Image (spheres, helix red, strand yellow):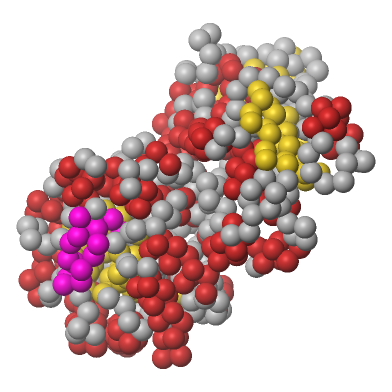
């Protein structure tokens, strides 16, 4: 174990609470709640990460008042009846040797008023994004209600057995809405000067200290709002310094961004396009400016090794790994045991975590489909059954199916038509900005080979081969193929696979490229960006009223900025037809108006793919055939990995899989 890693995994105290190491799981929304209370899924989820060796877990935001409740699947702490459910989480985490702090907050203006038919509350009547509801500008009576709610929530968390509290004053939530001159236009004692804007946070901390004096209290802040006229690191350091003089802060947890419909929000869940640890410098600024105050760092830190770097360099005292712990709950234990090479890495795709949160669904993970169903999957893995499985296809679904079946005790053979494994993920990872996605299949391949699974590449399976194998179960993970719709008499048309070869090749790209984005997927978006980065004039054309609709808002806001930087033209509510060999015409289906695009060297058809399922229909007489991933229906890697694991671990290993499948669907 290296010196930096040893330091990161060494014991430390935070606010008097002993922690077994300096790595923590920061608060992140799970959507596992019911009627704004935690469920057994929360307890199982956090217990698994505590079992994986982390020192501290900070809960997702616990809303202190019904005006912040939003969806019923979020967490709230509005009355004493919620205490037992929170105690169950604390007990589960403590049983596995980790400490747990409760993060308490009020979302303010971005609370979902539609869910409760009530107005959201904020410092001023300013919506968080274009088209969002205008919030209610809080009266002094409302402010008093919220302050008391923070105090009451703190007392309940104390009674539930939590080790500490984190007051959320960042991410553009209510306290930050009062702190920031961008969102606070008040003229009373809570607005105007910096001291007045700080008043609500001071009152909240006072209430929390009075009702739960035995608990250490930390503060989460956004170092930079990334908004014109907004809070910058120097401003926030002054805020924390002022609060530190008045309150015994246990730590400051340094994040960034505002909940605002702009690039700022994209930084809060920085995806793979941001590169390595893009905001690590923020924590160091606070640590240098506020000596003696423990500083917690967070955001797009992808591994225990990176956490160790920050601690060794003196930039932070503790480091938070949120998405990495979603992807691999045991990454700390693996590092401590010298097994970092076995870690399943977060690919920072935002598909299963924040992408599902945005859809009001429980989180999952492209890399780890067991998220939120840890107890059910533990039961599945505990049962081993002999037998043989043939997996056809070496993309994410096939690789995952092979591993899952092997772990259940099956003898597995995997055949892949191409000369290498990885499928379409390996292809997508060639596109600049999407390289990290390749970790998914590279690590799956690593684990498949380490398990000793028989792998035969360059073998195209047909019905005769499948029957000759005489496997007890067959998993078809043959993927999908792109569709190319020609434009007769028009410019040459490339499907998405051909477009990747073109933009990633050494030859010059066409001067003008039109991309037909019928699906709103990353395929069209990443190709548009890649062609533009190589100097092409790119026109992204969507027949719908939005673009990149399948890309989560958190990533799309960053994508929008990059489109702007690269000069990508976006045409919404437009259809494409050819005029001549280098001209296409865009038609507005509403008005019938047309717009020509001339000099077009290529049109990329990013329409829907089609399943490569011919082999399935040839095996109608084979009893146990299971289909996974795009061969089932063209979707994303999230579904492919999930269906692969289900196929290998459940369908191909359970004589009666229905009870398990029902449990997994809940």
Q: Position of residue 585 (x, y in %)?
A: 71, 25
- Residue in the image at 74% along x and 16% along y: 490
Choose between 466 and 593: the one closer to the eye. 466
Measured from the top left, where is residue 455 in percent x and y?
Answer: 64, 29
Q: Is residue 1 left or right of residue 422?
A: left
Relative to 536, 321 lies left or right: left
Q: Nearer the viewer, residue 451 or 346?
A: 451
Query: Residue 303 or 147: which is nearer the viewer?
Result: 303
Q: Is residue 219 left or right of residue 153?
A: left
Considering only vertical position in the picture, is 165 above or below 649? Answer: below
Q: Is residue 337 visible?
A: yes
Q: Is residue 326 left or right of residue 315?
A: right
User: Which quarter shows the N terminus?
Assistant: top left
Q: Position of residue 361 (x, y in %)?
A: 58, 62
Say which quarter of the image contains residue 622. Answer: top right
Residues shaded magenta: 10-24
Q: Nearer the viewer, residue 147 or 190?
A: 147
């Amino acid at each position: 174990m290296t010196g930096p890693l040893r330091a990161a995994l060494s014991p430390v105290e935070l606010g008097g609470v002993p922690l077994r190491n300096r790595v923590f799981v920061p608060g992140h929304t799970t959507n596992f709640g019911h009627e704004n209370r935690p469920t057994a899924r929360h307890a199982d989820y956090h217990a698994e990460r505590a079992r994986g060796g982390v020192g501290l877990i900070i809960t997702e935001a616990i809303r202190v008042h019904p005006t912040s409740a939003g969806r019923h699947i979020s967490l709230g702490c509005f009355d004493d009846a919620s205490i037992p459910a929170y105690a169950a989480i604390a007990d589960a985490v403590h049983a596995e040797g980790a400490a747990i702090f409760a993060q308490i907050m009020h979302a303010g203006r971005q609370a979902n008023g539609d869910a409760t038919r009530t107005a959201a509350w904020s410092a001023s009547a300013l919506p968080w994004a274009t088209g969002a509801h205008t919030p209610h500008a809080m009266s002094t009576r409302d402010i008093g209600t919220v302050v008391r709610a923070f105090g009451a929530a703190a007392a309940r968390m104390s009674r539930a057995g939590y080790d500490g509290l984190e007051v959320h004053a960042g991410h553009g939530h209510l306290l930050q809405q009062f702190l920031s001159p961008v969102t606070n236009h008040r003229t009373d004692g809570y607005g105007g000067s910096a001291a007045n804007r700080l008043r609500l946070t001071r009152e909240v901390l006072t209430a929390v200290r009075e009702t739960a004096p035995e608990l250490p209290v930390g503060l989460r802040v956004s170092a930079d709002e990334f908004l014109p006229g907004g809070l910058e690191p120097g401003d926030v350091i002054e805020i924390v310094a002022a609060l530190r003089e008045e309150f015994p802060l246990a730590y400051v947890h340094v994040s960034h961004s505002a909940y605002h419909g702009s690039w700022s929000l994209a930084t809060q869940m920085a995806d793979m396009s941001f590169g390595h640890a893009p905001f690590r410098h923020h924590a160091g600024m606070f640590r240098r400016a506020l000596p003696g105050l423990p500083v917690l760092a967070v955001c797009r830190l992808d591994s225990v090794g990176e956490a160790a770097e920050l601690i060794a360099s003196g930039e932070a005292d503790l480091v938070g790994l949120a998405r990495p712990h979603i992807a691999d709950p045991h990454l700390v234990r693996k590092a401590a045991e010298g097994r970092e090479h076995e870690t399943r890495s977060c690919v920072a795709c935002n598909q299963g975590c924040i992408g599902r949160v945005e859809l009001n669904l429980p989180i999952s993970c492209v890399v780890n489909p067991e998220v939120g169903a840890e107890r059910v999957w533990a039961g599945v893995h505990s049962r081993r059954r002999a037998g043989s499985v043939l997996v056809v296809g070496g993309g994410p679904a096939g690789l995952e199916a092979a591993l899952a079946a092997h772990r259940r005790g099956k003898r597995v053979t995997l055949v892949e038509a191409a000369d290498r494994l990885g499928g379409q993920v390996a292809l997508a990872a060639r596109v600049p900005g999407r390289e990290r996605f390749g970790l998914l299949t590279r690590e799956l391949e690593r684990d498949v080979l380490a398990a000793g699974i028989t792998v035969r590449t360059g073998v195209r399976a047909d019905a005769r081969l499948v029957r000759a194998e005489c496997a007890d179960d067959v998993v078809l993970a043959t993927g999908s193929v792109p569709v190319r719709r020609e434009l007769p008499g028009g410019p040459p048309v490339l499907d998405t696979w051909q477009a990747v070869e073109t933009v990633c090749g050494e030859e010059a790209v066409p001067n003008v490229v039109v991309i037909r984005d019928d699906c709103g997927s990353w395929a069209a978006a990443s190709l548009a960006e890649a062609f533009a980065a190589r100097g092409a004039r790119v026109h992204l054309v969507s027949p719908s009223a939005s673009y990149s609709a399948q890309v989560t808002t958190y990533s799309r806001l960053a994508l929008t900025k990059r489109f702007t930087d690269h000069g990508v033209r976006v045409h919404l509510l437009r259809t494409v037809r050819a005029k001549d060999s280098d001209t296409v015409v865009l038609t507005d289906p509403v008005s019938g108006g047309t717009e020509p695009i001339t000099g077009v060297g290529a049109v990329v058809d990013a329409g829907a793919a089609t399943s490569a399922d011919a082999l399935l229909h040839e095996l109608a007489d084979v009893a146990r055939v299971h289909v996974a991933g795009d061969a089932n229906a063209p979707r994303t890697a999230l579904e492919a990995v999930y269906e692969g694991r289900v196929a290998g671990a459940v369908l191909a290993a359970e004589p009666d899989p229905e009870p398990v499948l029902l449990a997994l669907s809940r």
